[in-house]
Image: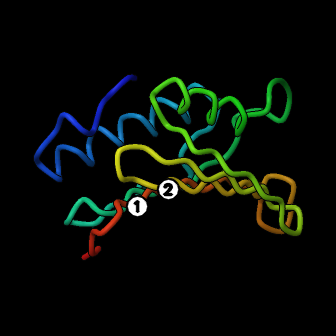
Amino acid sequence: MAGSATAVADPAAEARVIEQDLAAAFRSGGLSLLDEPTKDEQGCVIGYLLQPLSQHGPDSVDTTVASLHDDGWGGERRTLLKGMRRVTLTKDGWTLRVRDYSAQRAKRGFVALLATKAGCKPS
């Protein structure tokens, strides 16, 4: 779902737009929720704990990141640390960290998305 956080003045409304971007992206990537989304009252933090729906087919993290690119997320940086893939993206003052633990069986193969608003103090 395309959205532009810059056009929204209300921080809570801006956070909802970011939340919609993330939810649409992880669904298109074949990821499902493991737990309720994490959100703070100030609209500074949005987080998801996810798992791939299938172990076969396209890479769910790469597909999710591609969907985010389509919604205007950019500035991609990738790192690999002890089998955990990390992808960092930015959009309209938000930083998104994607952590892919799917190769780490001890972590039960989950994927975490955590978006934070620059200069915002979480409650």
Q: Of the residues shown, which amino acid type is indicated by label 1?
A: Thr
Q: Is residue 75 left or right of residue 120?
A: right
Above or below — where is 102 with respect to 65? below
Q: Is residue 70 left or right of residue 108?
A: left
Residue on which disc 1 sits: 116
Number of residues whose C-alpha sits closer than 10 Å to that of mark 2, classed few (under 14), some (14–19) or many (20 or more): few
Mark number for residue 64? none
| Residue 111, image x, y percentages | 66, 52
Q: Give the left or right position of residue 32, taking residue 83 as reference.
A: left
Cβ–Cβ under 8 Å for marks 2 and 1: no
Q: Residue furthest left?
A: 10
Q: Nearer the viewer, residue 55 or 11?
A: 11
Report, in whole angstroms, how far the alpha carbon at label 2 lies from the one at label 1: 19 Å
Q: Position of residue 114 (x, y in %)?
A: 50, 58
Q: Quadrant of the C terminus?
A: bottom left
Taking the image as shown, residue 70 lies to the left or right of residue 16, namely right
Residue 14 higher or lower than 64, as above or below: below
- The amino acid type, in three-letter code, at marker 2 is Asp
Residue at horizontal 20%, vertical 65%?
42
SS at circle 2 = loop
Q: Residue at the location (27% across, 69% down)?
A: 120
| Quarter placement of the N terminus | top left
Q: Which residue is mark 2?
A: 35
